Image (spheres, rainbow, N blue to C red):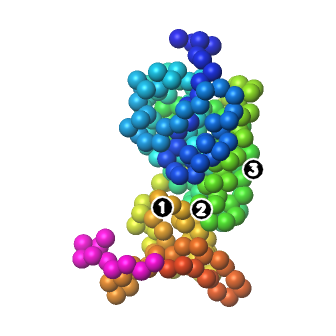
Amino acid sequence: MTINDRNKGYLVVGSRPWNQRVFEEVIANFPGEWNYVGSPEELNIEAVRRINPRYIFFLHWSWKVPDRIIDEFECVCFHMTDVPFGRGGSPLQNLIIRGYEDTKLTALQMTNEFDAGPIYIKEPLSLDGDAEQIYIRATYMAAEMINRIIETTPKPFPQEGEVIVFKRRKPQESEMPRLESLVSLYDFIRMLDAEGYPRAFLEYNGYRFEFSKASCCEDRIVAEVTITKVNENGS
């Protein structure tokens, strides 16, 4: 089966609550038949073949996509860097911790190598606000890019430039380090402040202090703190 044989159906894949919200509010109203998948169990080759989508759009996905899906269907993901700079995991956190204030949201064709495929569209993206605000902003932008892709079916162009790969952050890296300024501390808190992410934390005297909803003033940070007792096994 060739791409031209496919119907006007589309599949959107996302793993965060805001992904499904933007799908229902915006994307599902675009022309064509739209389907949504929100878990790895739902994303299998048999289910995708039944939908037979022209494109599969990945809004936010943390699992490896089966090679058979990538090889058989045109898969588009949205990566929060100006690739080939910033390929790899935790792009938002890696950008903010390096001091970036803005970036590019890139729509690229998925290949069997992570974030290495050719590019459909790049758009500027502000890194202002906490992580969840940025992710929501990026998802609405991705919706606009999806509309452009289905309307114009652009041919993606190869990446050019030096390849810089980011490492995916681990939960234990959310422990707050010694930082030189309040702004750096504020950035560390906000870059982890999103549903489903391990928030910035400190452990003291058998308790864990997790920080969220931070704002930075001239000489202080104001934030919400959740305090829980640390179990003997450290969790």
- For label 3, the crowd category at 10 Å Cα-Cα, with few meaning under 14, some 14 to 19 and many 20 or more, is some
Q: Residue at x 32, y 84 (%)?
A: 206
Name the kind of residue labelled 3 in the image.
Pro
Mark 3 or mark 1: name the one nearer the start of the chain.
Answer: 3
Q: Say which residue appears at 52% left-offset and 43% top-offset.
A: 14
User: Which residue has dot 1 on it?
Assistant: 197
Q: What number is the disc on residue 131?
A: 2
Point out the stretch of residues depicted in magenta: 226-235
* Residue 38 screen position, x and y as percent: 47, 42
Q: Nearer the viewer, mark 3 or mark 1?
A: 1
Q: Secondary structure at mark 2?
A: helix
Please count the marks in the image: 3
Counting residues from the start of the chain, the first of labels 3 and 2 encountered is: 3
- Residue 218 percent coordinates (x, y): 71, 85
Mark 2 belongs to which amino acid? Ala
Rendering coords of residue 26 (x, y %): 67, 42
Residue 233 colored magenta? Answer: yes
